[in-house]
Every structure is written in C-alpha cells, then in structure tokens.
Image (cartoon, rainbow, N blue to C red):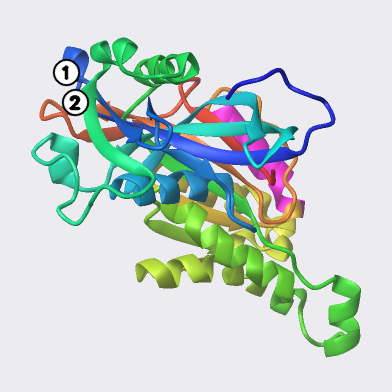
Amino acid sequence: MLIPEDAGSPQVFAAGVVALRGSGKRTEALVVHRGDRADWSLPKGKTEPGERLAATAVREALEETGIDVVLGVPLQTARYSVVNPAQPLVTAKKSVNYWLASPRDPAIAAGDVDVPEHWQPNHEIAEVRWVRVSKLPGLLTYPHDLEIVREAVDAPFHTSAFIVLRHAQAEKRSLFRARMGEEIGDVERPLTEGGQVQAQALAQVLAAYGIHGVHSSSAVRCMQTVQPFAMAIGAEVDAIDAITEEAFAEHPKRGVEEVLGLLRNAPSAVVCIHRPTKKRLVREIGWEVDQQVSMTLAPAEYLVFHRNAKIRKDGTSGKLQLGHGTVIEYGLHH
C-alpha cells in the first residue's frame, strides 16, 4: 500500500535489481510474482542488520529467484511510505535502491536457461519469469517499477567496476604508539574489532560487483580491510608499497601512477587506500574520467567507477573506455 510520506516516520532501507539479458527488441527483464500480494514486481528486499545496500540487492535477487547476479551501474531510488498491517496507524518511509544487474551464469545470461534447476516456488515468490521489456507495461503492478526498468534499458550495460576503498576503522595512532612504542612503524597499525566487522561486510559488497583483482596499500590496516574478500574468492592481495601514507608523502606521483594504471587496465578491481592519500588520488582519477568527484569518504566507504567497455563483434566486452561516460557511484553508509 502506497500512502503519502510522513516526515516523522521511521526509515526502512531496501535494495533490488533490474536484471537484464538479450539486446535490442529482444531485451528481457527478470520479474517475480508474489502470490500473497498478487503482484508482479522487481526482485528486492529489506537490508539485514549491518548489511550494505549493494549486498542486499544481490542477496535478495538470489533468495527470490535463485539467480546470482553481478551489479552494474546504480539506478534511481524508489521512495514511498508503507503501512504495517499489524500496526495500521504506524507508517514507515521506505527507500529502495536499485542497480542494473546481469546473471553470473552464462546459460541464464544467454537465455538458454531461465532459472536454476534447484529453484522452486515458495511462500513468498510464486513465479519467476524473464519478460520482454516491451511486454512489461501490461504486467508490472507498480508504475515506478516500469520507470526503473526503462532507465535500466537506457543505462550503460557493458561496464567494469573499479572500486577505490578507504580502509575500515583502525586503531587510533596515539593508542597504537602507547601500546607498541615508537619503534613500531605506523604501517603496522591494525583494524579495531569494529573495523574487522566492517571488513567482513565489505567482502559481500565487493562480491556483489564481481570484483576479481584485489589491490591495497601494504599497510596492515588496508590489507586487513580487503583480506576477508580476497580469501572468499581465493585471490592474493597485491600489496602496493607506493600508496602507503609514508611512501605517498615522499613520492606521490609514483602512487598516483600505480592507481591510474589499475583504473586504465585492470578488469573489475578494488584498491584500498588511506585518508591522507585519498584527496590526491581521487582528484587524479576525476581528471582521468573527466568528472568532478567528491572527496568525502568515511572509513569503509568507497567509490565505484563503472567504466564502459568497447564491445567486440561477438558481443563480449573489450578494451575499457574512460571518460565522461564513466558512471560514478558513492558507496556510503546508509
């Protein structure tokens, strides 16, 4: 039920995807039929405690459809108010962040298979269907879903994510010095327990974007931030000495070239950096993609640069194309 928003209403955060396959007039979108609500809509759902929105979008798509997806560019956020049937006098302001997405399974992406064999209708989702976009106006229940699908169809589809990540919460410098003494360098300063929790949550986020390359300042706090993800995908962390705080302060150009080299060439990668190096690195990346980029990033927040890829004759992605067409996404805490 959609009702006018109340400024004093509690907040509900959710996320979903517009998963597409095919091209041109044959483009299909993934939709679900909820039996209890008798509606057709996009895969979506509420965040779990401590979960980031990007991870929610992928998890909900998998739970509802059995299809594992990779996130592409961000789409609009749907905002409306909802009523809890158990508390009809209490309204909540709900926001649903959407992403363009594609199936990881090549057979599903190619249209040879619609859903995995193991998927079965359940108490929430009665049917999963790939539907031609041209047929959706007569099927989707909610007008804002159709609006988001149309946005997705017009968005860049063949993109590769490059993520610049500020390391998670680390032990304070003063406490580290008092505990370890002056003879131990700041590069050894670790994450706090809270930072380790953030690193675990980030592992799900990085997986959501289909990241393969894991790069980091060789400082312990940066390495610890990306290690949970690297372990999950069986990858080695590429430790880069040139982008530690100390090395960057002495030779910033070396650090910049290291990161720009990854931006220009690395397929789906993350690089973990420090707050003091962030301003220069982000500014240089902004010049590379011909866009102004915000410098504000709290611990464990990130920027996603969705780089366009040139399409080969066989339909696969080829050389990365930087420039103003690069879509920038801000992965901030909600």
Is 289 covered by the magenta stretch?
no
Compare residues 185 and 152 and report the one nearer the observer: 152
Report x, y in % for residue 90: 75, 35
Q: Mark 2: which secondary structure?
A: loop
* Mark 2, other Cα within 10 Å: few <14 / some 14–19 / many ≥20: few
Question: Residue 58's mark?
Answer: none
Look at the image and tell me whether residue 257 can be seen.
no
Q: Main secondary structure of the magenta part?
A: helix
Quadrant the C terminus occupies: top right
Q: Mark 1: which secondary structure?
A: helix
**Horizontal relation, residue 78 to residue 209: left or right:** right
The magenta region covers 276-288
Query: What residue appears at the point 20 percent right and 14 percent down from the top-left corner?
Result: 24
Query: What residue appears at the point 75 percent right and 40 percent down from the top-left corner?
Result: 296
**Horizontal relation, residue 314 to residue 130: left or right:** left
Residue type at the position of mark 1: Arg
Which residue has dot 2 on it?
A: 22
Report x, y in % for residue 299: 72, 56
Tag 2 and tag 1, C-beta contact below 8 Å: yes
Is 281 covered by the magenta stretch?
yes
Residue type at the position of mark 2: Gly
Compared to 285, does 169 lie above or below?
below
Compare residues 158 and 66 and report the one nearer the observer: 66
Q: CA distance from mark 2 to mark 1?
A: 6 Å
Question: Residue 26's mark?
Answer: 1
Compare residues 323 and 42 and report the one nearer the observer: 42
